[in-house]
Structure formats: structure tokens, C-alpha cells
Image: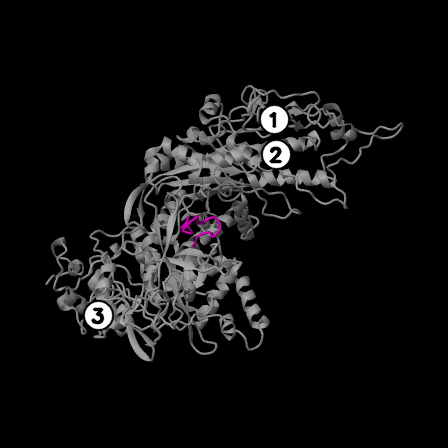
Amino acid sequence: MLSNREWMYTKRLDNRRLFNPQWPHYVNLFLDFAYANATNIQHIIREGVEVFEIRCPCAKCKNIYYLPRELVFSHLVNRGFMIGYTQWYLHGEKYPTLEIGQCSNPISPQHVGPSSNIETVQHINNDFSDYHRYEEMVIDSMHQPEASYYQQTPQHPNLEAQNFYKVLKQASEPLWDGCTKTSTLSATTRLLDWKSQSNVSDTSFDTLLSIVKDILPTGEKLPNNFYETKKMLKPLKLPSERIHVCINHCMLFRGQFADLDHCAVCGENRYKAKGRKVPNLVMTYMPIGPRLQRLFYSRKTAKHLTWHADHLVDPEKMIHPSEGEAWNHFDRKFPNFANEKRNIRLGLCTDGFSPNNSNTTPYSCCPVFLTVYNLPPWLAFKHQYIQLPLIIPGKKSPGQNLDVFLQPLVDELKMLFTDGIETYDAHRKTNFQMKVVLLWTVSDFPAYAMLSGWSTHGNLVCPYCMHQTESFRLSNGQKPCWFDCHRKHLPERHVFRNDTVNFLKGKKVKGHEVPVPYPTGEYIWEKIQHFPTVYNGTPYGPNYIKPKGFGITHNWVKKSIFWELPYWRHLLIRHNLDLMHVEKNFFENMFHISMGTPKSKDNMKAREDIEMLCDRPILNPIRDNNRKPRKNPGKYTLTKEQVKKDLFDMKRCIVQTMCKLEQIYPPSFFDSMENLVIYLADEAIVGGPVHYRWMYQYKRKLGIIKRRIRNKARVEGSIVNEHLVNELATYCSLYFDPTIETRHNREARNFAPQSHRFSMCIMYKTPDGSARHLEVIATKPSRHAYFHNGYFVNGYKFHTQQYGEGRATKNFGVCVRGETYNAEQESDYYGILQEILEIEYYSSGPSTVLLFNCIWFDNKDGVIVNKNKLVDVKPKSRLQTDDPFCLASQAEQVFYTPYPSMSNETKDKWAVIKTKPRGVFEVTEAEMEADEVFQVEERFESPLTVTRVEPLCLASTINTYEQISDEANERIVEEDEEVEDFEDGGDENEFYYSEEEFEDEDDGDEC
């Protein structure tokens, strides 16, 4: 007999497929020990019989599901124990002490039994089930390997280790003596998450804590106030750094300047004149490396960080920047970086905002955001996943000196790309060298100049045309104008090129005149590599000398700090035009000039410019004798009686649209925003979908930040404190019980109204006495739902896709007949089964409804019927719906198979194979006609008889799931997944499948 827990992983002898004959005996000894501790047993009344269940520690259930002893025995015999579960903390065994010199005392099978007692020094007691969830949170936050925290440590622990052990203890100690439901850490983190989500002040939080502490029994261990709460959770907090800044934005007091008391550039004092050494200006920097590492340390988020490489690519749609040319060009340029799909790609955004209202002193604060493009879109744009590395302090805008504040971020980005940091991937249980790249920036046009160094003022505003622009300054309006600058983008023989009436007088654009090629990174680097910077002792200001030729041959003010990144010159797109601001400014200009508002650009000076530049007599100013010149309403000015027309009928070709607008609007309308529109399509081709490159999500984040500012006198400090608390609460809420509503599992904002409308429609619009079962459904089901891996229904044997992977038969194809089905038109819905749910209603006695949650193919574009009435589906064409459920009674089974030929016509299609139902039916006595042919589309309509088969019962779990659904009348026959023998002695004819058939189908698993 082995003297330690190595026996748990000796199901096979000598690493071969030879089964260990002692293995069932070992499993029974473990079960005896688990059932000896009554606190770990769940008592359930099922069909009038009391059932005792424990957590199943098999390699698949992983202590998540409660099952009866017989099923746990079956799982362990067939699958073995989960990896790393050598300490049975969820089955009655107490943790060993974490004091130095103590280590766990593994128990051999000969010591395990109903009367076993483990004599250890107890300081962590896990008699309640959710303690392990918070221990996992602590371990993930400290990036410790699984189960390493109870290993023996010969050295004295350092301060970090001591804090780790302290928080680990709080994760497992009861909130008060005798509490079997909540630990000190779980209660504290839930209260902190409530504070963060509800935006509660510190004082209100302290008041709530005092009330709760008065209600709890004597000896409770809740912290007394918010300060003690932060102190208790400090080991889980991510690092931040306060950096002093020169009041004139000249330099940062860091590195070699950390000990200076005066600015090395302007000589200003670092500290305020009176009292203690209080700095004049402070910037808080929150390093991005540890924050990106934490995404990998948590099992909840690590699995999503390769979505950009694992998701299905639809050749007809672009849904992620990884499908754009800029992403792929970078992969080709840096193949070593691209080979590790866990490497992180970021996008940067900055935008100034005023935390005060318009009636107070002007104040500008500039947060800097980072978006992780590895995440799927439903996570990447959530405010809790948008990183906030630094906040540039006010009260004035940094302007071109923004680079001074970006120095710590750029230094860390350089280190993360060249060297990387070793990171533990909790999802794949491996360490790797994580590297990071900044793909581009996103900003409005003023911030575009601050980030890129290309000034957005003057005639050379366009960052694509640069010095080859055709813009000019209006003689009367004295503003830069881009009127008639877009005809060179038209096809060579387009009719607009020869139009001399509707554009500039007498001007033709010849066929050989084409737009200038877009400047590449290498071309720009050649031009600016010798230009000055603003962060090396020469800050931008009144005495700043701009590079030679500024405003004539170029518009460069500085060499941006981003050129220090070793890959920056190789990027196809470095700074994005923000679609949000471009469309806002464009259509605001169009609205004001069309509606004749005071902000309209159609003024008298604009009419004088029209008279000088264009051949439009109707728009020329009217000059009467001895009267002030006046103007006629233009044809673009709408009256109340006119119906609004769509100005973008030719939306497919933005250049033609711009040329048409130039025939309508005056030259003063065409400022820099109107010129930038023609480049948006090109940026989309290079950069990918626009929702990754606009500022809507950052504006929402700014709104959240603004609402959480407590101290208007210390805006930046208040933002940082709230952000660190929110960051901690977001991480802790990942480990809450699934039944607790958090920011991660909150239902969509449009789900509740739909549910309410359904209930009201059924309850009040259904005639009395009709559709009684619909009224039952409208009262909403129980909050508990049963999840199944497989089901016998309608004569078909269904499996979920996850359960069916790796098996010879793929029983997860689902077909639901369309309501308008006929032989000539295919209106069926085809899908892939993801979940099988059983929900219960109790309004008129217990009743059960069975639902299939499926991924559906688009029945318009994704389902194809050929001339032979055979059906194909496009697996990448998915139906976008908020109702993915169907009743099990509606489901028919189909199989999907790819075509053997990989031609362009068939490589992206699956053939649909419809099958006949297979099951136990009560066939009537009447004999079928000898010549009657049974067609695939036909079904027996005789009643379905279902026999409950206990040995084939699949593992079920009880989880929270709210979903409105219809009612099904069939009863459930559950199937088990890997059982060799039927031990109940029942008649073999009662089963749908014989023992041989069941073993043949599950031959992919170990038996």
C-alpha cells in the first residue's frame, strides 16, 4: 500500500492501459471517508426518496457537481481523480497548518475509513462549500501554482508571503464562530463589490458596516470601516505609482531626476512653498504589466485571451481587427511575436474632460485608456476591462507636452515588447513569456495632434495628403477650405472630372491626376527622425522652436514619443481618425447649414467666396442701391413644408458623394472634418471593424469616471482611488457564487422588458379558459434549472456539442420545422445543440419543461436548397437572435457532414442529413400496407412511451437560470456517459440502446 496520495493517480499500472485491480477498493475507501463527515453531505428529497450527495472530484466534474455515491463511484472508476486534489478539503479533511515547519500529512488508503480522524493543527476549516472559491481567488491573485500554498517552506516567509497567508486564512475562516455559509473574505468582498457598483460614498459604507456588525452575532470578524476593508484586501490590490510633475509640464521627477527639488528645465519649485513637502503636481501611474498578468492568473478570464486567434472567420464579414491588413502585416513582420497567440495587443485612447459643470472654473483632466484586443468584443468594450494606466493631471491641458506624461507607459511598453514578462496561464496550466504590442491610438482630432506630433491647424491639416494637399484659404472667410479637392479620387473617365460649372470655375481634373499615395511609417521616419522631442529638456511652449519648414512643407511640431517603440515605423496605421467625432462634426455642419441656424457657415462672407470661386449666380449676394448686401435662401436650405431627403443615396461611393455635396454647398462648408471622411473606408480596410477604433466606449468610461469623483478639489486622486477599488471589486466578483448578480453575469438591459411584455401579453390578452398552460408559463419558472448532457426525446438521442465532441456519432444537430413549411420552400431552422435545460413551474402543481439552447444558422443566407431538394448550411453564417431556445418537443435530429471535395463551391458548406426517429413507440394493432413506403419526412404520431432508466442517467447539476419558455409534455430519460454494466438487473428490452450499442458509441472514453 502506498504511503502517500500517489495512489489517487494509479488507475493504470506503470503508465500503461492495464487497469489497476485495487483501484475500485481505493475509491470505496475515499467514499467511506467522505461520507463519514456529515457536514459535507447534501440531503435532497428526490421523488419522495431521501438522497445523500457529495461533490464529485472526478477529472470532469472537478468538485462542481453534487452526485449520489453510486454515481461518484462510477465517475471515479472510469475517469479518475481531478489533478492536484491531494488535500480533500471539500470532503471533510481539514487543512494543515500554514505555520513554518508544518506540512501536510498525506493519508494512505489504509488510514481512510468511516472512523478516520486527521490530527493536525487546524487554522483553516472548510466545512462550508463556497470557501474554496475564495481560496482560489487569493491563489490566482498571488500567481501561485495550484495547491502549492500548503507545501512545506523551509525558509521564513517574506512580507509578500505573510500577507498572502493572512488573506488565505481570511478566505477560509468563518465570519463568526459557528457560521457555515460565509467566510470573512467573502462577506467583505461582496460588500466592496456592492459599494463599487452602487457608487456609494465611503461614509455611507462605514455606516452600513456599523449596522451590519450590530446585527451579526458576537465575535464577528467584519472590518470596522472602509479603511480597514482596504487594509485587509491590500495583498489583492494591484500596484500604482505616484510621480511628481513640474507645474509647467516640463519634466517628471523620476529616474535620474527623482531627488531634485527644482525643475531642471524651468527652475520651478517641485513642492509648494509653505508647510510640508507637498508637490505642486502629481501624476498616478498604474503599471499595465501586472494588470495584464492578472487576466491570465484568473481562470475566469485567461480562456478568453486567445479569442482573437480561435474565433471562426467569416470570409464575407469583418468582425475583429485580426482580420484587417494592419494586424496581418504586423504578424508577417514579427513572426516570433505572432507565433504565441497569448501575446497581448493593445489600443490606446486619451481624451480630456471637465469634472465640473460649465458654471465653475475651467478644469481639464486627461485619462489614458488601453483596450485589450485579444478579448472577444462582448468583453473588450466593457468598462471593467478597459485599462486605465495613467491620469494626466489638470487643470490645463498638456497640449504637445503630452509626451512628458507618457514616458513611464512607453518605457514599460518597450520592455514588454523586447523582453516580456513571465506569466502563468491558469487556463492552460503553463508559464510563458508574455509580450505586448501597441497597435495604434484612437482619439479626437485635437488629441490626434498631441499624440502624433502632426499639427491639426492650418492648411496642412490632413495627415494623409500632408504637403501635397490642394486646400486653400478663403479670401473672405479667412478659413482653410478643402473645396474641390476630391475629384482626383474619382475613376479616370468620370463625368465629374470635366465639370467646370459645379466646382471651381473653369477647373478640370485630368485623368492622370490621382490621389497621393498614403505615407508609410518608413517614409515618415525618414522625415522626422531628426526633429526635436518635448520630453528631453525642450518642452513645448512660447519659446519652443518648431522644425524648419513648418506650415509650408510639413506640419510636424515634434517627434512623437511613440517612435521610441521599436516596431512603430513598421505599423500600417499608427493613429486612427475617430469616426465618432468625424461623423458628429460632419453632420452638425450639414444640419446647421441646412436648417439655417446661427451656427450655419452659409453667411455673407461665404456667399462672397462663392461669387469669387464658383459659377452659381443664384447664390451670389444681392446688392441693392444704398442697402446692405443680402443673400437668397440656397437650395440646400430646407423649409417646413419640404420633406427630408436622404443626401447619401450614393453612399457606396463616398468620393462621388463628396463631389455631389460640392455641387450643392458653399466652399466654407468643406473644412478639415469633411475632408477626412474619404479616408475612413481605407482605415477600415487596414484596421478592421470601426467599433474597435472609435471613442464611444471611452466616452462611456469617462462618464462612469466623472460620476465617481468624490473630491472636486483633488480630482485625479479621487479618480485613482475609485478606480483601484473598482479594479479590486471587479476581480473579486469573478469568484462569487453564480447565484449572486455581479457586473459579469447581469442580464442584458433589454431582457427584462421583453420578459415583462411576454407575461403581460399572456396574462391579460389570452381569452378566459384558453391556453391555460401559457398562463402557467407567464408566472415564470423556478430559479433552479437542471442541466443535462444528453436526452432521449421524440425517439431521438440528443447530445450537447461539447459532450459529443470526439465521439463517432454527432448527435447535436437540431432541426425545427418552420410554420410555413412546404415542399417547395425550405423554411426550417437548423442549429447545433449547446445546452439541455429542464425547468419547473409550480403555479398549478409541479410541471416540467424541457428546453434546447442552440446556435442557429441563418435560415435566409445560411441555408441553401439545391435543385435536388437537398439542404446545405453555411456553418459560419449564424442567426443573430435573443431567443436561442426551442422546446424539445419541437426538435428533430439532423446530422451535418462536410463535403469530401474542397472546391470553392463546397468547402464552406455542410450537407444536412435528416434521420428517422429511433425509440420505443406504442405501435397500434393495425398492420401497415405492404407497399407503403416510409419517408424521411414522415413521423409516427402515436403516443411516445418513455421508460426511466437509472443506470443511463447523465450527471445533472442545479444552477440558476431564468428563461421564459413554453411547456413540453414529454418525461425525461437521462443517460450516463461512461458506464459499462447495467447493475439494476432490469430487462434489457426496456432500454433504447443495448449494452453493446452504448459501449460502441462511447468508445472514445476510457472504460
| Coordinates of residue 334 in the picture (x, y in percent) | 35, 32
Left/right placement of residue 645 relative to residue 719 reads right
Left/right placement of residue 315 relative to residue 749 reads left
| Coordinates of residue 75 in the picture (x, y in percent) | 24, 64
In the foreground, 564 or 488: 488
Disc 3 marks a residue whose amino acid type is: Phe
In the foreground, 713 or 533: 533
Q: Nearer the viewer, mark 2 or mark 3?
A: 3
Q: Which mark is residue 673?
A: 2
Disc 2 marks a residue whose amino acid type is: Met
Q: Please, which residue is most extreme toward the bottom here?
A: 48
Residue picked out by circle 1: 494
Range drawn in magenta: 856-873
Mark sitting earlier along the chain (1/2): 1
Mark sitting earlier along the chain (2/3): 2
Left/right placement of residue 674 relative to residue 935 reads right
Does the magenta-highlighted stretch encompass residue 464? no
Q: Which mark is residue 982?
A: 3
Q: Residue at x 53, y 62 (%)?
A: 752
